[in-house]
Image (cartoon, helix red, strand yellow):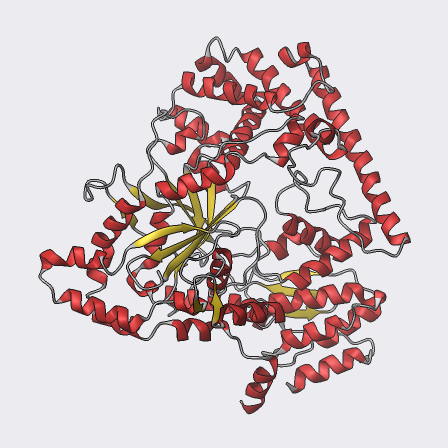
Amino acid sequence: MRNVGTNLRSAEMHHSKGDELVKVALKDHFGPGRSRAFSPFLAPDERKKLHLLLDFGDGPPPSFADALRSLARRYIDDGSSEKLRAVCLLIADLFEQGWRVAVQEDQILFEPPGIAQADGQTIDDVKSRVRAALQSARQRQLREPSVSAFLHRMERRTARPPGVRSSVLDLVDNGADLAQEFRRISNLPEAERAAALAGVVDPVVEICQSGAKCRNTGLPLIDIWRYFRHTWAHEYRPVPGRQLLILVRNAARQNRPVIGIAMLASPVMRVGVRDKWIGWLREETEARLRDGSWEQPALGAALLARLEESIAAIRWDDLATAAEIAEPTESTVLRLEQKASGAAFARDLELRAHYEAHREAGEKITPMRGALKHAAHDADWLGASEDLLFVRKRAEVLSQLLFAKQMFRAAGLTRNPSAALDQLLTARSGQRAIDIVLTECRKAGLSSRVADVSICGAIPPYNEILGGKLVALLLASREVHDAYSNRYSAQISVIASQMAGRPVSKPADLRILTTTSLYGVGSSQYNRLSLKAAHHPGLYADVSWGAIGKSFTGGFGTLHLGAETAQALRSMAETQHVSRRINNRFGEGTSPRLRQIREGLDVLGLDSDIILHHATPRLFYVCELGVGSRNALLGMAAADFRAETSAAIREAWRQRWLAARCQREETLEAMARLGPGSVQSSLHAPSDDDLLESAAAG
């Protein structure tokens, strides 16, 4: 604690060591080719403060990140140190996630931990290292007063509507009792074991609807889901867009204990591995035409149909004439592009005026959401389509679609699709036209037929009997498919309705589920996760999760940056741009958090791509719901579709995994140590005082 205390006190007193800046022997401490250097936009005094903070000598102590955050919070009311505060919070987050941090003259150097296995390390070692980095943010969240109060409220035994005193811990099964049941079954004749297992583990899917309560405990289902979500390795953050919260419970046991939880969420708009596998990338389209996987007439018809559907989904009466829509020309496209640019400029002025009005009044800078904030039954969609944001979007998208239509007409795609596709794929303008329509295919598919499995796993003690595999398989069930359809098929889309100038409801016909491996080195939950219909008579078709590829360079995300850092960076961006350009508004763009952090990093003079590039390769997995689901996302699939029932899936899971797993003595011994107490202890992080006392004792 002495090094960090000395550094922090020195910075607080604005103590200077003169003109000599800290220098670090980087060659000995940073890996070749992996360090990333930045020169943040700081005043000379601020730069000296920062270098004093980072003068570690033999290296920063483990408590450095918390101490740095405490110092950063003292700069909240100090406008001259606003940038330094943001940089301090950023460095604290990166340090806690395993990044190495150092300074050399006027630069800060970062090195991400990566995912590579060092000599002698196993895959489990790598997973443990990544998990430990994520745990720091989770532990910090668990110590937040609001989260701690929620956990204690859920665990408190209270009289609730079913007429019993209950707690969320009543929904955690007793591992010792369960292990005893499995031992009893293992002593039965083999012919009787299947029925006996069904009498002990009978998984059912329960959808967490708003306002719905557990009939066993009286607790809100959403709160039950949230409680168990806090047991995950990384902190809990609500996500925007569509989401379906799912509990898998054991109907065969008292109180129907929770086996596992899952969440389906809106998918990420651009994922190269996924988009290539589906066929939404032009290079893949061309490859499938060449190898005969797709036929030119079918693809040509699908592209034309998608193009016309996308044009029809845009209000264009104030942008173009019917003749221009039917037979677009280059001048029409150019005029629409100019219209989009003009609307973008006008909206920028509007955002600045909103910012200045609040600042002059001494008010908090609130988001500018527009006149329409939600899909009310009496919403004026025509008027909402004239909002400057949607004038720009409508003109921009329509210009692209009419360009593609112009190219398709010139190539004769309707008359001779084979020749037309050959021509389009070899010319730059034709390639652009195909890219535009494939993008529309992707947008349509992601909005209604693809969901991302952002949370999926088992709750102790069911993790010991591969309950995570069960939960992943049940996501492909008819019950989940129908619940998703019921939730969203009749819901009016705020963005699509403002684009169309009329109420629009998109279909919610799930056909593809996607997920990624958090650790980048494989997932025991999804690897070889397949139920073959040939081996399980109750299944109509195979139910299978499969790896489709790996991003070796990692991706972009904000999982490694905390909420406090994100807020500081957003404030920096607002001050720089004299407006709040990202208002968390439907239609403004995907991932507001990511874009806000990008803006703030750019203002600080830091390369946002380098900070947000988590350098962690990810494995991508998919599950098709029914035969031909992949081609359905291109409009080239047969109409027949049938999802499997949860009853058939759970029976196959019992045969495929549970029957053998529950006979392993090491599994039963591990299970016997798990239960309500182990779950509860994992959620209650030690206080800051406890941590300091522990560090002092050490």
Quadrant in which residue 404 is drawn = top right
Image vertical order of residue 431 relative to residue 297, above or below: below
Looking at the image, which is closer to me, 98 or 222?
222
Image vertical order of residue 140 relative to residue 614, above or below: below
Image vertical order of residue 17 relative to residue 574, above or below: below
Looking at the image, which is closer to me, 349 or 367?
367
Residue 452 seen by the camera: yes
Looking at the image, which is closer to me, 56 or 619?
619
At a point 48% along the width and 31% down the height, the residue shown is 283
At a point 48% along the width and 69% down the height, the residue shown is 159
Residue 132 percent location from the top left of the image? 49, 69
Residue 619 percent location from the top left of the image? 43, 51
* Side of 111 where 546 appears, left or right: left
Residue farthest to the front, as pictured: 163
Looking at the image, which is closer to me, 377 or 530?
377
Residue 209 percent location from the top left of the image? 49, 49
* Side of 370 where 260 appears, left or right: left
Quadrant in which residue 687 is drawn = bottom right
At a point 56% along the width and 57% down the height, the residue shown is 614
Residue 526 seen by the camera: no
